[in-house]
Amino acid sequence: MKADTPEPKSIDEYIAAFPPGVRKVLEEVRKTIREAAPGADEAIKYRMPTFTLNGNMVHFAAYARHVGFYPAPSAIEKFSKELSAWKGAKGSVQFPLDEPMPLALIGRIVRFRVKEQLELGKGKRRAKPTASKR
C-alpha cells in the first residue's frame, strides 16, 4: 500500500486497494489466520491488517514483491528453522508474491501466537491486591 494512500478503516478496505492477484493472496493469508485464531479480532494497526487477542497477535501487509508477516520475535525464534528459507528480521518474515504462500506454516505460527496471547491474558486477569482495611 502506498504511503500517500488514506489509511484503511478495515481489513476489507486494505485488501481492496491491491490488484486482483495480490488481493487473492491477502485473502488466503487472512482466511488462514482466521481459521487458526477464530477468537481473534480484526483491526488495522500501523496501517496493516492486524489480528488481536489480548493485544496485538499478528500483522501482515503487502508490498511490491512480498507479503510481510509479523508474528512477534518469539514466533520467529520458535519457527526459525522452518522460516530460514525466507528473508526476515527479529519479528518479521517476507514471503515473496511470486511463490506459493506457506499457509500451513502461517497457520502453525498463528496457533503458537494464540497460545502465547492466551497465557498473557491469564496474567492480566489475576486478582489485583486489595487495599488493606484500617
Image (cartoon, rainbow, N blue to C red):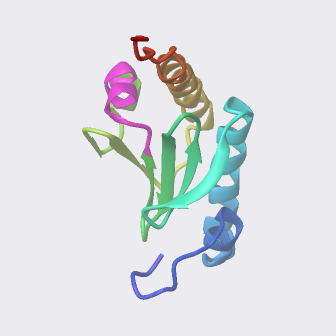
- Is residue 5 depicted above or below 87 in this figure? below
The residue under the point 52% across, 78% down is 7
**Residue 69 picture location, percent across and down:** 45, 47
List the single residue furthest toward the bottom. 4
**Residue 76 horizontal/vertical position (percent):** 35, 30
Q: Residue at x 42, y 65 (%)?
A: 65
Q: Measured from the top left, where is residue 28 in percent x and y?
A: 69, 50
Q: Nearer the viewer, residue 11 or 82?
A: 11
Left/right placement of residue 53 relative to residue 77 reads: right
Considering depth in this image, is 117 or 82 the residue closer to the camera? Answer: 117
> What is the x, y in percent for residue 39?
72, 33
Q: Is residue 73 located in the magenta-colored stretch of the structure?
A: yes
Magenta segment's dominant SS is: helix
Q: In the displayed structure, would residue 26 be above or below residue 36? A: below
Span highlighted in magenta in the image: 70-80
Quarter of the figure that contains the C terminus = top left
Query: Which quarter of the picture shows residue 41?
Result: top right
Instruction: Residue lying at the far left in this picture: please name it.
Output: 90
Figure label count: 0
Does the magenta-highlighted stretch encompass residue 35? no
Q: Nearest the camera: 126 or 51? A: 126
**130 shown above or below 97:** above
Residue at 65 percent across and 40 percent down: it is: 33
Residue placed most toward the observer, 13 or 17: 13
Residue drawn at (50%, 53%) of the image: 60
